[in-house]
Image (cartoon, grey):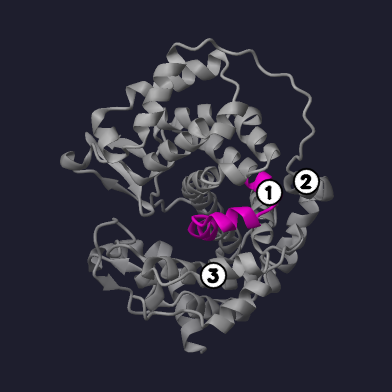
Amino acid sequence: MGDLELLLPGEADVLVRGLRSFPLRDMGSGGWNQQHENLEKLNMQAILDATASQGEPIQELLVTHGKIPTLVEELIAVEMWKQKVFPVLCRLEDFKPQNTFPIYMVLHHEASIINLLETVFFHKEVCESAEDTVLDLVDYCHRKLTLLVARSGRGGPPEEEESQYSTPIQELQKQAELMEFEIALKALSVLRYITDCVDSLSLSTLNRMLTTHNLPCLLVELLEHSPWRRQEGGKLQQFEGGRWQTVAPSEQQKLSKLDGQVWIALYNLLLNPEARARYCLTSFAKGQLLKLRAFLTDILLDQLPNLADLQGFLAHLALTETQLPKKDLVLEQIPEIWERLERDNRGKWQAIAKHQLRHIFSPSEQDLRLQARRWAETYRLDVLEAVTPERPRCAFCSAEASKRCSRCQNEWYCCRECQVKHWEKHGKACVLAARGDRAK
């Protein structure tokens, strides 16, 4: 895999230098689509670099050219588009798209950016290069984790089911909700990497994490609910690699990656001297944190030995008097990206939706063919297979697949029967992609 390269060093440099922020009304436009494709290429190259362990030029380029703040702004902008513009767009009477791919690309943009940030934030210098936008990113992660906890109370993410009665808009909304669950799990990893940098975070960021959002208590709730695990048909399933997988009885005591991220984040926030000094241990916080003792079993400590220090902290906390909330007067920075975007676009959501419907999301057949060709060039099959950690899965039943659609080469199936059943949903996309391929 080390020999597989999507971008040459000079190409990657040009793509990173060209990253910029787009106004909400331009999302889905030609220039925006070009940047989305560039981000996908950078994303795949960053994963290849990390997997091959041969240096990580994408991460270095993003830091050198000061583009992490740009990615954070784009991330929050598309989050706002999904919350404020997309629902309005779906309610417009004349919104009857022949093809929903252009809109799906905008919905998918948030997943692309958070995936890239998850890959590069492993390096502390990336967190430092985020500068003041780390405050905005902390707020973003808090919003996602709060939704994750709320959703776990409703039985977890929705199932991806086929329905012959679903309209294209309903399918799009369902896809957006499924995507939101995976985005929230990526945000959890990003937050954990931010907590690795507690020593270098500003006092405003620390206060935001510990006082404004009380992240330690939110993380305890996540451990309690574990929305990435569920019981299905009497079997334990775990969300991993983008899908639900049955966990063998012999593997059920094994610490999952997501549980590990929560524990490491808690360790960083509760045991770092600077963070401990600033965290107010109220009676509520004490009660929440002491719930962790039930999870700290010998089996867990064998897998994460450092948690023995956290166990000692909790034993001491049980004997400690609680504190009253602090009322110190502190001058601090506040996140500004969300507030600025909302202020600049307030009262314009419907106008933005109508503009995008007229000029962006109603492409001609020729435009769609051209875009399909560009997608085929961006999502190179050899690279996609290299960054996929396991064998492909059937697009219809999720079983391990060995047969690929001969026309578009994009979907996988375990058997002919599943391919026929999936054709109703896959047909339009298949024909479009095949036309784009022939147009090369």
* Residue 305 figure quarter: top left
Instruction: Where is residue 177? Give x, y as percent.
Output: 51, 46
Q: Nearer the viewer, residue 242 or 210?
A: 210
Dot 3 or dot 2: first in sequence order is: 3
The boundaries of the magenta stretch are 115-137
Mark 1 and mark 2 residues within 8 Å of each other at the beta carbon: yes
In which quadrant of the rendered image does the N terminus lie?
A: bottom left
Whole-angstrom CA distance, mark 3 to mark 1, is: 27 Å
Q: Nearer the viewer, residue 324 or 390?
A: 324
Which secondary structure lies at badge 3? helix
Q: Main secondary structure of the magenta part?
A: helix
On screen, 50 above or below 310?
below
180 on left or right of 396: right
Answer yes or no: is residue 151 visible.
no
Residue at image mark 3: 58
Dot 1 or dot 2: first in sequence order is: 1
